[in-house]
Amino acid sequence: MRSQLPGPGPKGPTNEWKTIKTLLPYLWPEGETGLRIRVVAALILLAAAKGTNVAVPIFYKQAVDSLTTGGPAAGTVIAVPIALLIFYGLARIMAQAFGELRDAVFTRVAQRAIRLAGLRTFRHLHRLSLRFHLERKTGGVSRAVERGTKGIEFLLRFMLFNVLPTVLEVAMVCGILWYLYGVGYAVLTFAILIVYILWTLGITEWRLKFRRTMNEMDNEASTKAIDSLLNFETVKYFGNEDHEAGRFDKALQSYERAAVQSGTSLAVLNIGQGVVISAGVVAAMILAGQGVADGSMTIGDFVLVNSYLIQVFVPLNFLGFVYREIKRSLIDMEAMFELLEENPDIADKPGAAPLKSGPGEIRFDGVSFAYDTRRPILKGIDFHVPAGHSVAIVGPSGSGKSTLSRILYRFYDVSAGTVSIDGQDITMLTQDSLRAAIGIVPQDTVLFNDTVYYNIAYGNPKASPADVEAAAKLARIHDFVMSLPDGYQSKVGERGLKLSGGEKQRVAIARTILKDPRILMFDEATSALDSRTEQDILTSFRDVSKNRTTLTIAHRLSTVIDADEILVLLAGEIVERGTHTSLLAKDGVYADMWARQQEARLAAEKLSTLESPQTS
Ligand code: ATP
């Protein structure tokens, strides 16, 4: 799988053109006539701004000429330069005003492009498979998106309002110089420009590797910081603050080194640019000085040549910076657009149909699966859950129980066999319709950093407060919530850490009840609860599961004795199946697990009766 981070690999103009091409449709948005008019208006204003800007030195030259040539009628002579100077001033004002107007008109287009690109990437990230998200570092991905959208803003602002205008201006100035003073001046200006550009591009290319390293290290530092802060408790349990700081600092050190190299090399670039510009201006001035000396040019012409060169080179001085930043923006945008090119492993097939409504019968036929082809996890699983029935899956840790639920939810596709719901192969269905039909209470519940209400209502954002409360009651969490000072408006903290494991689990149960799916899947949904609450919830489950197909994954066998069928999974294979009583009668793996759990329970009970006199 490709890396989404800008690495030091071969990045050439092809990539850059591709990035720019990806951006273009955002600037000419389909069906947005208003925005398209803005683009055209901005281009017209751009041409107007540059046109007036180029006229400024001409008024200036004429004013100088009319002042230096002198004449007999002093009164009329002074009126001419004053008029010219007023025109000069007006032209300057207009050039600036056109420029500002152009910015104002274009801002909406640029901001819309940024919004749409950011939104598209966000949606795409949600469409990518679980596998992508497990393998990628969230911190790195979010930085790539953040920097990518900033990159778009920069690129638009400078490419359109700096590079393009400068090119236009240079072309106009060269044309005017050619027309007024012959081809020599135009060639000289052009030559200085070429040397300047070659120097800038060459050195900037060399410097870019520092920037790439800085980006990589910035991603790395941010990934490490986020990971470490998310695991705050674990870090404390093991007193590993220094270890974490060391890992973070390693990335920061590399960043520092690259940033220093980048800063130092900038001085080389700037000095070189200064030398080229100064040498060029001096050469042109010597040429013009000679022209004045031999009478072919006026003082005004001398001033005009100087004004034009300075006018062209001042923004060029800026161009070095702009070029660097544009390159950087392109790299950042490339990283973001690469995310967009990432294809989801699990995609709706062409012509995928929505799951037809039905009673919710599940069938696994010869299902085999591996996360990594080198290590098979499920081996030829066959089972059938008739609609409205409940099947429990038990087995030792790592035997593949949760994997079965991930496959049913189609987080992964099977490598052999088929899974069907109501006779429809799930790979032929749209993912949205499939997932809408299944409610999962996962093993590890992670909550959004919002209120309890928000987290329960997440199961069905359209539910009324009364529905939310009813679900909370069924999940035996309502009384607890009411005992909190802020009730349903209490914040649950980052990832729900302010709630206990059992409370989080009950919130997860409530939101799944609210989703109201035809198939329910409980993956150790009561493992964090004490046995009394567990019993209460199991009673609720029985109510909720009525007329629904239920798959329950459990460690504690006492929670599944009522299941219509119990499957015993061992190393990815079903080794036994039947009801609780029939499995006990078989005296096999299940009976053995049952006996051991009973022993452990009895031992625990004995211990608590022995301890209770001392504690009371
Ligand atoms: P437990 O009772 O501990 O929850 P389980 O029976 O539910 O275990 P699964 O979560 O299905 O086990 O995992 C089965 C095996 O697949 C485990 O050995 C696990 O290491 C492996 N596994 C799970 N997820 C992945 C993954 N994303 N990539 C690679 N291997 C994985």
Image (spheres, grey):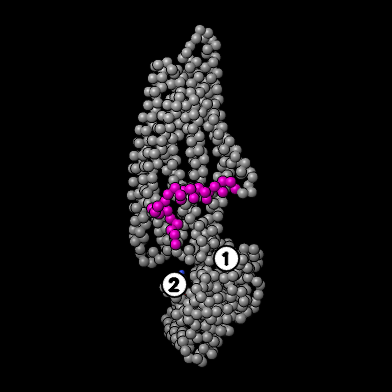
Expressed as whole percent of the image width and height from the top left, the position of residue 342 reads 49, 59
Expressed as whole percent of the image width and height from the top left, the position of residue 528 reads 49, 74
Q: Which residue is drawn at 46% across and 65% down?
A: 134
In this rendering, position of residue 89 left or right of residue 354: left
Checking the image for residue 246, the label placed there is none
Q: How far apart are marks 1 and 2 (CA)?
A: 23 Å
State the SS at label 2: loop
Q: In which quarter of the image is residue 482?
A: bottom right
What residue is shown with label 1?
A: 348
Checking the image for residue 373, the label placed there is 2
Most distant residue in the front direction: 183
| Nearest to the observer: residue 82 or residue 477 | 82
State the SS at label 1: loop
User: What is the three-letter code of the residue carrying label 1?
Assistant: Asp
User: What is the three-letter code of the residue carrying label 2?
Assistant: Thr
Q: In this view, does 422 lie above or below 152?
A: below
In this rendering, position of residue 109 left or right of residue 201: right
In this rendering, position of residue 294 left or right of residue 540: left
Q: What range is drawn magenta here?
A: 1-29
Q: Residue at x 49, y 76 (%)?
A: 368
